[in-house]
Image (cartoon, rainbow, N blue to C red):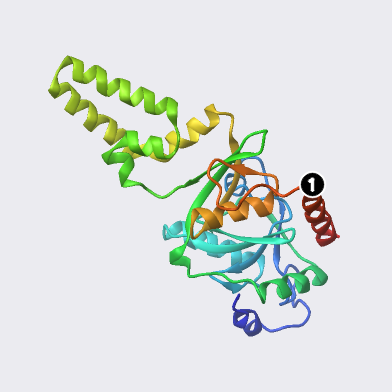
Amino acid sequence: MVDTAHSEQQGGGAPQAEGTPPSAVFIVLKSIPQRSYARDLRLRDGDVIAAIDSIAFHGDILEFENMLIAARDSDTEIFVTIARDDICFEIFMGRPLGATFDYTDTFRANALSERLATYHIGPKAQYKTYEAMRNVHRHVALHNTSYSGLATVFPPLWLLQHRALEPLAAVVAAYAAAAAVHWAAFIVTVFLIGAYFHRIQFRILRNYNLFTEHYYWVVCAARSTADAQKICRDIDPKCTFSFSYVGPPQDGEADATKSSKRRAAKS
């Protein structure tokens, strides 16, 4: 459940100055430029800043932007709950978004407050960032962006774990060629490939997914792959995964119901 104590302490009533919101409303992303941090996070116009560090956030735009500047200067990230249509999910933000903002109206704010009252957010430390890339067939490649020691120690197993077969074949071929030349060349090759994977392991996955025609789609924070898949399924009920924790996609009737609920929420 989201803590609402923060919002209660901020007082109520009408705005006292231009640009200052009533205490009960939320900040909404009004416009996102093509080249911006908000676009990198795959945020959308209309996304609402619902909570920060598990506390419902009713601060003004300047306060929120100052928090992002402080996060950048201190090299930390703030833990933000995003409300999109009829779903909520978490995301880490580490610098100013480069977007323009507005405030929700009272009706939308009240509906979101009711939803947050029953929405559970776990401790920030339990969450990791996941990036989802989706192709035209709605197949999703989902990856934890955290550093993996396995990629450095044993790149072939790490590539196999992520089903990156073409890079796996290239690495194995490099090992084989080096071993055919000399055992010392094999050791040097193993060390160099491990060092390379240590530095850019997640970029390797991104580039491989682009090669297989999966494109940037969703960035979220979740406690497990299963939770991240659920977020993706909530956003797109027809998306699929190679190894699914959330079952098959919804049928057409369920999908139509989901779409109608989203249209109702927007209206």
The picture places residue 102, in percent across and down from the top left corner, at 74, 61
182 relative to 204 in the view: left or right: left
Q: Is residue 97 above or below residue 34?
A: below
- Judge left or right: residue 197 versus residue 48: left
Q: Is residue 265 above or below residue 165?
A: below
Query: Which residue is depicted at the point 66% across and 75% down?
Result: 118
* Residue bearing the label numbered 1: 252
Q: Is residue 231 visible?
A: yes
* As drawn, 178 above or below 221: above
Residue in the foreground of this view, choosing between 67 and 84: 84
| Residue 189 vs residue 39, the one in the foreground | 189
Q: Is residue 99 visible?
A: no
Q: Position of residue 184 (x, y in %)?
A: 13, 23
Mark 1, Cα crowd under 10 Å, few <14 / some 14-19 / many 20+, is few
| Quarter of the figure with the N terminus | bottom right
- The number of discs equals 1
Residue 92: image x %, image y %? 52, 58
**In the figure, residue 10 lies in which quadrant?**
bottom right
Q: Nearer the viewer, residue 119 or 163?
A: 163
Q: Position of residue 215 (x, y in %)?
A: 60, 35
Left or right for 167, reference 100: left
Look at 76% across and 76% down and name the residue there: 15
In which quadrant is the C terminus drawn? bottom right
Local SS, label 1: helix
Name the kind of residue labelled 1 in the image.
Gly
In percent of the image, x 58 and y 34: which residue is there?
A: 214
